[in-house]
Image (cartoon, rainbow, N blue to C red):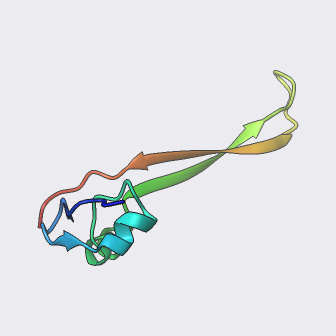
Amino acid sequence: MSLGTRFCQRCHDEIPPERVKALPDTVLCVDCSSEIGGDYQVSFVAENLAKSGSLKKNYGAWTIKKTRRSIRPK
């Protein structure tokens, strides 16, 4: 299966095929990804399962929010 040649949105260098195979939705080369902290910004939010109006905090799970970083060319 050929993934085709993909270029970094920040520096316009070729993204290695191994990286594209491991991270199919990547738009950054390894160097740019390490410089800006990755393709995505990840945040975690605790879900409060306590009754409405209660001061007790009863966290039952965590929600993960993943948003793509804005990428500016070098």
Q: Estimate the x, y position of residue 5 in percent, counting from the top left.
A: 20, 63
Figure quadrant of residue 49: top right
Give 29 or 47, whichever is nearer the viewer: 29
Q: Residue sitting at 50 percent across and 54 percent down?
A: 42
Q: What x and y, as percent, mark residue 8?
A: 20, 64
- Image quarter where the N terminus lies is bottom left
* Residue at 34%, 59% in the rendered image: 26
Which residue sits at x=28%, y=64%?
A: 28
Count of picture labels: 0
Farthest residue in the top direction? 52
Residue farthest front in this picture: 1
- Residue 2 vs residue 42: left or right? left
In depth, the one of 50 and 42 nearer the eye is 42
Q: Quadrant of the C terminus?
A: bottom left
| Quadrant in the rendering for residue 3 | bottom left
**Residue 45 quadrant:** top right
Whole-percent x, y for residue 21 in the image:
40, 65
Q: Position of residue 16 (x, y in %)?
A: 28, 74
Q: Residue at position x 17%, y 57% from top?
A: 72
* Apparent side of residue 16 relative to residue 59 in the rendered image (left or right): left
Give left or right: position of 58 versus 7: right
Instruction: Using the image as rendered, state which of residue 29 and residue 3 is in the foreground.
Output: 3
In this picture, residue 67 sits left or right of residue 3: right
